[in-house]
Amino acid sequence: MSERKALVTGATGLLGRQVFKGFGNGNWTAKGTGFSRADGTTILKVDLGNAEDVEKALDEFKPNVVVHCKFSKTRTPSCATQLIRSLGAANRFPDKVDADPEGTRAINIEASKTLARLCAERDTILIYISTDYVFPGRPGEAPYEADVTPAPTNLYGQTKLDGEKAVLEEFEKAGKEGMGIILRVPVLYGEAHTNAESAVNVLMDAVLKVQDGGKGVMDHWAIRYPTNTEDVARVCRDIATKYLKAKDRASLPRVLQFSSEDHYTKYEICELFAEIMGLSLERLVANTEGNDPNASVQRPYDCHLSTKALKDIGIDVSTQDFVGWWRREKRAFRK
Ligand SMILES: NC(=O)c1ccc[n+]([C@@H]2O[C@H](COP(=O)([O-])OP(=O)(O)OC[C@H]3O[C@@H](n4cnc5c(N)ncnc54)[C@H](OP(=O)(O)O)[C@@H]3O)[C@@H](O)[C@H]2O)c1
């Protein structure tokens, strides 16, 4: 079989690093792009806000598939930062996570739209990584099928949803439906450079913080489905292979969802980390308080993503066991 090429944006980030690795063998050749952490050789420095830079990367490498893992945090706080903020005394999702929402939207949505247009012009498949936070997560609604109308309750989810729409529209305009694919995933964990890179790994910091006399409060209400970055990488590769080979690509779904079935509150994850590390959780208080019905922003309670659309097209949706991974990979706990 001829060589297939994948370009991974955000390849210096938590997910992008694993996706890049995942395409690095077999019939695939991978190239990554990053920004501040790009080394300029395996990982190209490409400003995705600059269309000329993007065109150059596409024309030089000529990928069959682009996996778009980039998301600018210049103004939008990362999932991990949002989590840290949400741990505040009131334990409310911030009404405004961003001092400049319009600027953030412009940066992330425009970059995705431009990338989609350039990919469509070149007959290149684009997999856009999105989030479970496109759904409101109201009690009783989950699991969400991929075709349910999204209704995000925070800026991050709204920005990702607008990015989804921009990508699908660009491929539709070009008459290349089926080449623009959305893959929604929930909160991610895995090998990280710092705990703060992942909204799950960062909970180890919360456990460490209460060891030396400090006190903390941790959410024990919202349900999360921590999913391993290596598993997402495998699924991205399987999707790329499937859509690239498909003769009837336009009949394949445009929105896919992947998630682990393991579910925990953040407090339960802290309990697990403390148990694995032999640490005490005495000074971390579990906060079971749900949403204040009068708050202007309602935090998602359960955004569980159904993986049916992936299963229906024959893609393996199995995941590593969350507890097993952490017991095995204790070294992933950073100090
Ligand atoms: N992490 C999660 O729990 C989670 C959950 C659901 C969905 N997602 C989605 O998964 C994707 C990856 O998330 P992540 O947490 O892995 O992100 P991340 O660790 O923050 O990485 C972001 C990447 O984007 C790159 N980047 C930022 N600004 C750029 C620019 N102007 N031009 C080019 N590259 C730029 C960064 O490059 P440098 O670092 O080199 O500057 C980095 O490689 C995102 O789309 C996110 O929305 C993540």
Image: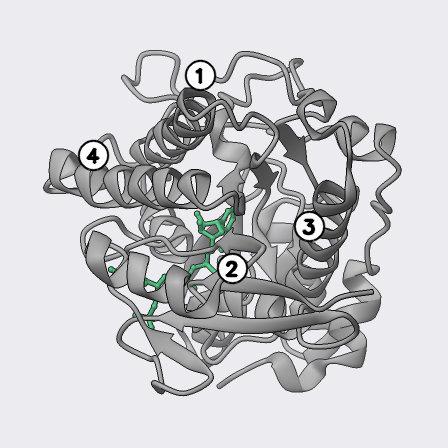
Spatial separation of the CA atoms under disc 1 and disc 3 = 28 Å
The residue wearing badge 4 is: 96
**Does ligand 1 reach within 8 Å of label 4's beta carbon?**
no
Task: Between residue 17 and residue 194, name the one nearer to us.
Answer: 17
Spatial separation of the CA atoms under disc 3 and disc 2 = 43 Å
At mark 3, the secondary structure is helix
At mark 2, the secondary structure is strand
Residue located 76% across and 66% down the image: 2
Residue 332 on image: x %, y %: 62, 80
Residue 307 on image: x %, y %: 76, 33
Q: Which label sits in the foreground, 4 or 3?
A: 3
Spatial separation of the CA atoms under disc 4 and disc 3 = 36 Å
Residue 297 on image: x %, y %: 32, 22
The residue wearing badge 1 is: 151
For ligand 1, which image quadrant applies? bottom left
Residue type, numbered disc 3 = Ala
Vertical placement of residue 320 versus 263, above or below: below
The residue wearing badge 3 is: 240
At mark 4, the secondary structure is loop
Residue type, numbered disc 1 = Ala
The residue wearing badge 2 is: 284
